[in-house]
Image (tube, rainbow, N blue to C red):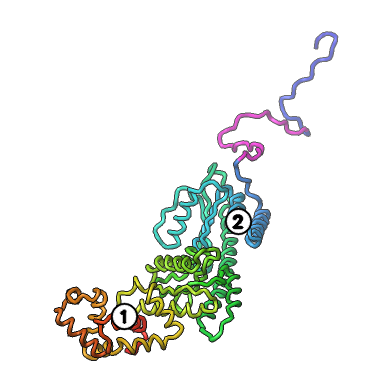
Amino acid sequence: MGPGGPPPLPVPSAHMPGQPEPIPPPTPDMPGQPEPIPPPAPNMPGQPEPTPPAGLLVERLRSLHLEMVDAVLAGDGLERVAELAAGAAGGPVAIVIPRLGTAVLAPEGEEGALAWVERYVADRLKDRPARVPDGLAAEAPISAGDEIVGSVVLLRGGAPDAVAPEAAEFLHLAAVASLTEVAIAEAKDEVERNLRGSVIEDLRSREAHIDATEVVRRAARLGCDLSGGAVVLCAELTTDRPRHVVATIAGEVAGALAQHLDGRVYALVPAPPDAEAPGEEALASARRVATRLQRHGTVGVSSFYSDPSELPRALQEAELVLEVLRQSDAPIAQDIGTGTYRLLFRVLASHPEEVRSFYEDTVAPIVKYDDQYGTDLVGTLASYLEQNCNMNATAAAIYAHRHTVAYRLDRVKELTRLDPMQSEDRERLGLGLKAYRIIAPRLPK
């Protein structure tokens, strides 16, 4: 002890009874010890939200599902559904439904990406080999029962860790909402098909009197203006894709009304209301469509009928043309839409007995003679008229001697009482041949 003061207290070298354990100073991690837990840091920009508890996730999924379905029912379309899915999943989302012709991407601006997604989905739906593209992060099928009608695809975009852990759930919700859009679209199509079918069915009924005003009104509800008349198409298909044919007609001619009925596709091609020559333009449009449809089957085209009350006759005329093209082996396909043939078809549609009578009064005897004796008077007469009544050219065309041609023409004169050498009789015989060609499918075999 120093002079003038108390001695210093000793420093305890051990824990005294009753005192709390002292807190040791921090020391470096010893081997085998766990790493210290760092304090939580705020989310960095671009990172997904941390996985919420199960209850919160279910509520979020339910809320997102309702928002997507509301968007569909409100008419906002699949664009809004894709936008909602992209916002939740943390990356660009594409929705592709080939059946509806729909392909959307959110956010916009990657048309190239949408193009390869469309190809990929189309190949998958057609069971064609399809390599999964590198830019595809996840996908959810849009299924109606056992049929897959489209797909919701999440693309890789931005940081790899930006995709939400629940992305698959969000894509599934978008697929369910997309299926609702499919159901709505197909319900609308069914209603329109029924309306189109009822209009065309009424015209096919060929009732003695048709309420033209009512037909025009009903067609107008479907965007088809028949007030100025129309041309009718009738197609018998060799394809199993009648919907594609109907869509082709609708896409080719604005305002056309087409429907698949009883194995055939019927279409009303209206006259353009403001055209200088509406009939000619309607015929041109109808023939253009018929040319496009030839690879899908045989197509008959009627004349232009300006009076809507005569549209049943137009439809019957188109059916007659179709029958002739299907069953006749005569080379008339190029000429059947114009000139004398067209006139005969119009008469046949309204007064079939007159065409049959004209046939009986002209070439029917030589048709029956050929059938009975296996000769070819009809073919010889047709070739003679086609060769401008040149005997030598006719002989060369049918591979016969000119004397054989002369003999056969004499038999034609004897049986029909019409002389192929006389101008007036020759015209009647030529018209009789045309009448025969268009009624031949209806003659008894």
Position of the C terminus, as image quadrant, is: bottom left
Report if residue 432 lies within the magenta region. Answer: no
Q: Position of residue 339 (x, y in %)?
A: 38, 73
| Res. 67 image quadrant | bottom right
Q: Position of residue 301 (x, y in %)?
A: 43, 73
229 or 276, which lies in front?
276
Q: Residue at x 17, y 75 (%)?
A: 392
Residue 148 in view in this figure: no
Can you name the residue that lies furthest to the right here? 4
227 or 421, which lies in front?
421
The answer to whether 216 appears left or right of 20 in the picture is left
Residue highlighted by disc 2: 81
The local secondary structure at tag 1 comes to helix
Mark 2 surroundings within 10 Å by alpha-carbon count, few (fewer than 14), some (14 through 19), many (20 or more): many
The answer to whether 421 appears left or right of 283 in the picture is left
Q: Are marks 1 and 2 in contact (CB under 8 Å)?
A: no
Position of the N terminus, as image quadrant, is: top right
Residue highlighted by disc 1: 427
Number of marks present in the image shown: 2
The answer to whether 182 appears left or right of 367 in the picture is right
Query: Is residue 10 placed above or below 428 in the rendered structure?
Result: above
